[in-house]
Image (cartoon, coloured by chain):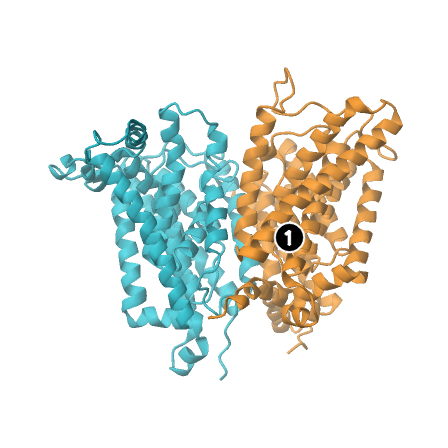
Chain colours: A cyan, B orange
Amino acid sequence: MSVSGYARRGVQLAGLAVVVVIVLAAVATVAFGVPISALERVVADGLDTLRRIFTPGYVARSMELAAPITLAAIGGLYAEKSGVFNIGLEGFMIFGAFFAAAATYFVGAGGAVHAWIGIGVSVLLTTGLTVLFAVLLIRYKADQIVAGLGVWFIGLGLVPFTAAIIWDSRNSPRMPGVGRVTVPGASEIPYLGRIVFDQSPLVWLTVLVVIGSWVFLYRTRYGYWIQAAGDNPEALDTAGIDVNRVRYATVIFSGALAGLGGAVLLAHSSSFVGTGQTMVDGRGWLGIVAYLFGNYNPIGAAAAALLFGGVDMLQGQLQTLNIDASPKLLGLLPYVVVIVVLTGWGKTQVPSSVGDPYESED
Amino acid sequence: MSSPSTDEDDAPSTVDRLAGRLLEATVLERLGIALASIATAIFIGLLAVALSGYSPLLFLNNLIVGSVGSERILARTLRFSTFFIVTGVAVAIAFRAGVFNIGVQGQFIVGGIFCTMSILWTAPLLPTGTVGGIGLMLVGTVAAAVGGGLYGALPGVLKAYADANEIITTIMLNFIAIGVVSWLVTNPFRAEGSTNVRTESLPENVGLPPIVFGDSGFSIVGVLLTLALVAVVAIVMAQTRSGYDMVTSGYQASAAVYSGVDAKRTIVTTMTFSGAVAGLASALYVIMFQGSFIEPASIHTYGYDAIAVSLLAANNPVGVIPAGLLFGGLNSSGSYVQTYSDVPVQLIDGIVGIVIVFVAAPELFRMAAERAGLGGDDE
């Protein structure tokens, strides 16, 4: 990466940090009741609205909504870092949500244990599918974009088909969730208690994945192999590392995480929805945008996903405040944000060999 | 990856490679790969039918009867085919120029609502007879092309001047088009007193005459217009300066730039042209078939299937005709399967997805053919 590359990346990360700090400051001001008596009446009204929007419940729910997007984003980020654009994330998420629902259903759909079994089975099955996808991309040099779109279409077709065969409807009956883990005492802490200590265990898992994948990518030898496979595959090959083996690993990992993302989405909802765009409804695409926005950094990607989760959650929040806006139009907000984000942040550090199949010289 | 100017070559280079690989192949090889993709996908579909406890033979029979089984069914197949051919041409224009327009569905929807509303608003101003009808159809067609063209130009401009990945922006714009038009059709544009979510119906004098087939939703005139459009696009792509610029940008981006092509402008032109053709597909859909505009989420995903149509045709506008006929048949039999069998019709969408995956990997069939001792002289 050149000097200008580092500079650009620095500017972007700084920009992201500023946005996050402003949001956090706003939240803190509202939450801890920073004295507002001195402020203008208008500001007080504005803050009052903000406080009613950014309730602890709102932030906690936004994190729940952000978790599936974050997981898909991290998977996609790993694949693309290694030189493979996995545009099939949306499709793998659809499979992930469905496999989790079907597995939960077949073991009895009785409680949280069954939901966890569903998540485990779903990750295994989605990983299996991704192995086929990886072989197609790497061994048979399939066009990454077209094949990825194909995966999406297969998900949109075969999943509702199978759902209709199992449940006589494209939607599943009611599914158990994993519930929330409440830490006694700590959950009583004002504001943060609800967000951190009374939270879905899958949000905690997501946070762990984010931190773990950051450490792995930037602080281990394997992480450097992944980066080299995308930026300079010839050098990695010369160093005696099999480029395609690295790429197999990342693509399969990306599918596994997208599947987990789908399963988490299901666990945070009440049932599987297979009509229209299915319950995944563009979240895999948001995942791709999240890692582009986060400039291929797992933590940046998670921050961007949180932004999307928050925007998504905003529609419900505005409705409860009786702010008059069509829910149908408000639901489009995340997609508009994506276009704005891509337009403003279009130039990311795309690894130089993304899209090219790699063939060893020997 | 230091100079930003090379960033935008990334996306085209992959299309370029796929198209190049398909172009290197002989026509026969290309046809073989297309047929093998379809046959394998249908075979997997039949396997899924068998695994879910239905009879695959009955399903296969339904596919055939449901696409060509009677005059009425044939009219339906041809009607679907015209939509797939025109949207397929829209995709082919963009893919050939190395731009991934995944937004044909959104451009179709925007073009359709432009067409419908322009006709409804102009109708009181024009006479009611045939002449007035033709006038209205012209107005609607132009409006559809303008609407689709503008909605295609937007991601084109974002790609050319802000470097926003067009795959993502066009998919987002599809979601936005469905949402906004759905809101329009449910609220301000909704027909008064209608129980269904739809606009007012077009006036009586708007519609194509049902000659040859006595089907009110299909006209042979629609087929002729479709074929004429394919011819025009093929000529524009092959014979005109801007068509030449588009195609060279797709195959050899750097060479195009060196020979004086304005790469950014070509991207915008390509997307506008592609979107306008998608709008024309919608004009045909509204005027010949629907007679009003309905809830966009329930419109078939012509714009997405068109990607498979175009790829099967190796992004050649003329090749889109047989590929479009095939998809017309598949979808027509989908309606048949839905009515006369218990097999969930979504299977057909799944089969389309599998076709796309196989088309993306021509290498798969080439290796299989080599192993079987067929051809294999390309190494």
* Left or right relative to B239: residue B110: left
Kindly indicate the quadrant of the structure image that contains residue A189.
top left
Examine the rendering and report whether any part of residue B69 can be seen.
Answer: no
Query: Percent x, y for residue B296?
Result: 60, 34
* Left or right relative to A13: residue B18: right
| A105 or B221, nearer to the observer | B221
Label 1 environment density (alpha carbons within 10 Å; few <14, some 14–19, many ≥20): many
Q: What residue is drawn where x is 35% and y is 62%?
A: A10
How many marks overall? 1
Q: What residue is drawn where x is 76% and y is 39%?
A: B142
Query: Percent x, y for residue B226?
Result: 79, 45
Q: Identify the image quadrant of the C terminus of chain B.
A: bottom right
Looking at the rendered structure, the kind of residue marked 1 is Ala
Q: What residue is drawn where x is 17% and y is 35%?
A: A190
Chain bearing tag 1 is B
Kindly indicate the quadrant of the structure image that contains residue A191.
top left
Specify the farthest residue to the left. Answer: A185
Q: What residue is drawn where x is 29% and y is 27%?
A: A41
Helix, strand or loop for disc 1: helix
* Left or right relative to A282: residue B231: right
* Left or right relative to A268: residue B98: right
Q: In this view, does A272 lie above or below A138?
A: above
Kindly indicate the quadrant of the structure image that contains residue A94.
top left
Query: Percent x, y for residue A70?
Result: 36, 50
Examine the rendering and report whether any part of residue B321 can be seen.
Answer: yes
Q: Mark 1 points at which residue?
A: B308
